[in-house]
């Protein structure tokens, strides 16, 4: 499932009812944006609004080869599809997030 704020995706196409996810489950969420010292803080705050029990030990940060972009990955203990949809909506609607995977 990929949410990108520049395009309008049909959520039903991205996460269909035939998805094999069974809840609750651990689910990694990745956000890509322009590098900055506070990008990881922003992503963590946006995700923790919907998953306050995230384990920060799952936090992974990766800079692009030229250092211009940064990806932040956090694993959440997802309780429902609605919870994941809300996380992706918040991430993809923020102007600093280029893409959420």
Image (cartoon, grey):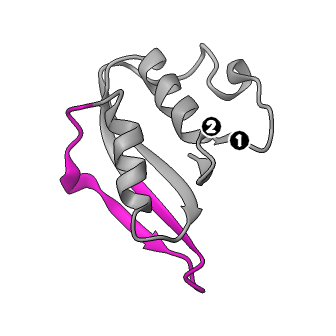
Can residue 1 be seen in the rendering of this structure? no
**Compared to 61, does 49 lie above or below?**
above
Can residue 40 be seen in the rendering of this structure? yes
Residue nearer the viewer, 72 or 81: 72
Does the magenta portion include 66?
yes
- Residue 93: assigned label: 2
Which quarter of the rendered picture does the N terminus lie within?
top right
Instruction: Residue 50: give x, y in percent of width and height.
Output: 35, 27
Q: Quadrant of residue 83?
A: top left
Alpha-carbon distance for marks 1 and 2?
6 Å
Q: Which stretch is magenta? A: 52-73
Does the magenta portion include 55?
yes
Relative to 43, 9 lies left or right = right
Whether the residues at callouts 1 and 2 have beta carbons within 8 Å, the answer is: yes
Instruction: Residue 13: give x, y in percent of width and height.
Output: 73, 24
Residue at image location 38% in from the left, 59% down from the top? 40
Q: Quadrant of residue 93?
A: top right
Instruction: Residue 98: give x, y in percent of width and height.
Output: 65, 53
SS under mark 1: loop
Residue at image location 47% in from the left, 31% down from the top? 87
Residue at image location 24% in from the left, 39% down from the top? 54
* Residue at the spot of label 1: 5
């Amino acid at each position: 499932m990929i949410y990108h704020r520049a395009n309008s995706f049909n959520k039903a196409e991205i996460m269909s009812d035939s998805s094999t996810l069974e809840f609750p489950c651990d689910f990694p969420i990745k956000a890509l944006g322009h590098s900055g010292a506070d990008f990881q803080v922003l992503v963590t705050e946006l995700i923790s609004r919907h998953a306050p029990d995230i384990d920060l030990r799952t936090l992974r940060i990766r800079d692009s080869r030229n250092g211009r972009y940064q990806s932040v990955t956090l694993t959440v203990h997802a309780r429902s599809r609605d919870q994941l949809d809300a996380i992706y909506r918040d991430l993809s609607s923020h102007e600093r997030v280029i893409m959420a995977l």
